[in-house]
Image (tube, rainbow, N blue to C red):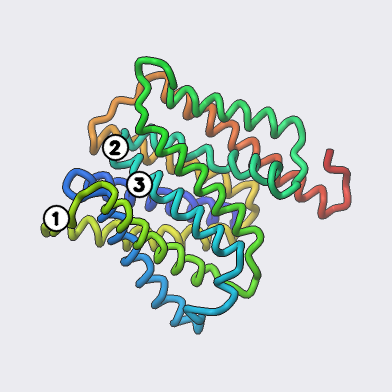
Amino acid sequence: MDNIRGSALMVLAMMGFAFEDMFIKKMAGALPVGQILIVLGIGGALVFAVIARAYGDRLWSRDLAHPAVILRNAGEIVGTMGFVTAIALTPISSASAILQATPLAVTLGAALFLGETVGWRRWLAILTGLCGVLLVIRPGLQGFDINSLFAVQGVIGLAIRDLATRRIPATITSRQLSTYAFAVIVPTGAVVLWLGDAGMVMPDAVNMMRISGAVVIGVAAYYTLVAATRIGDMSVIAPFRYSRLIFALFIGVLVFGEKPDALTLIGAAIIVTSGTYTLWRESRLRRASLAGQPTV
């Protein structure tokens, strides 16, 4: 029963993130990307700051200057800036497909930088998943869009964020981390706005509602995600993260009139299959390790 509840919450969270992406893309036609980053950063930081204080968390402590926290925030900047830009400039379906490679990038980074052991099966899954990313991006071919590399930037940044999170002291709560993750997006958006030589635009009533929707749904999706990870077996629940791609495909087709081609769909399927296998394999090895069994 817990696995069913956890899986349902995970799907609900992914649907929320997909709708948040939809609002961002809708705003991108009227507001500069830098301004979108600023308003999302302010909105998210304020909401999580209120929640953190309600739980008695301090909004500032020396722990927040820990190198792992700084690295996590840097990854958040790189990842969020890349993915939001990709959503604004490329089809939401292809950007979301590339984003699904993040778990593979995390496994790759854990092997290269954290000294974690990765067997040949997961190495093969990583390489297969990267081939799927290449099918979506298609470098050097007619369908190549250089703006799709912003989605790759998003994968790299979010992988850095997730890897750094593993080294953060337990004394720092997820609410504190979320507050500062959103807060650092504000100056990042200001820099993007300045580099793009674009001024702030006063949003109309429709875009104000989109901003509110993106912030509220994004925060709700995050909390639903946290709730999902605390229920049941992660080997069952984690693969449902990929439902975000299904929602993104439907939104891309129904809302934005996108028509993903065969290569994009095949590449997305390869990424999802490789990532799902990697998550399953990691969970199996973790259980074997806890049971004192060989993990080869």
- Separation of residues labelled 1 and 3 (CA atoms): 19 Å
Residues at marks 1 and 3 touching, judged by CB atoms closer than 8 Å: no
**Residue indicated by mark 1:** 206
Report the Cα–Cα distance between label 1 and label 2: 20 Å
- The residue that appears at 35% across and 15% down in the rendered structure is 142
Asked if residue 278 is positioned above or below residue 206 in the image, the reply reads: above
Q: Work out whether 76 lies above or below 97.
A: below
In-front residue for pair 190/154: 190
First-in-chain label (1 vs 2) = 2
The residue at the point 47 percent across, 65 percent down is 178
Question: In which quadrant is the N terminus drawn?
Answer: bottom right
Q: Which quadrant holds residue 277?
A: top right
What amino acid does circle 3 point to? Val
Residue 84's disc number? 3
- At 44% from the left and 21% from the top, the residue drawn is 139
Q: Amino acid at mark 2?
A: Leu
Label 2 neighbour load within 10 Å: few <14, some 14-19, many 20+: some
Quick check: 222 above or below 296? below
Alpha-carbon span between mark 3 and mark 2 = 9 Å
Identify which residue, 108 or 26, lies in the foreground.
Answer: 108
Of mark 3 and mark 2, the one earlier in the sequence is: 3
Q: Position of residue 268 (x, y in %)?
A: 47, 29
Badge 2 marks a residue whose secondary structure is helix
Point out the image quarter for the C terminus: top right
Residue 179 pos. (x, y %): 44, 69
First along the sequence among labels 1 and 3: 3
Q: Position of residue 111 (x, y in %)?
A: 71, 42
Residue 222 quadrant = bottom left
Look at 35% across and 72% down and name the residue there.
46
Circle on res. 89: 2
- In the image, taking residue 295 as reference, residue 39 lies left or right, namely left
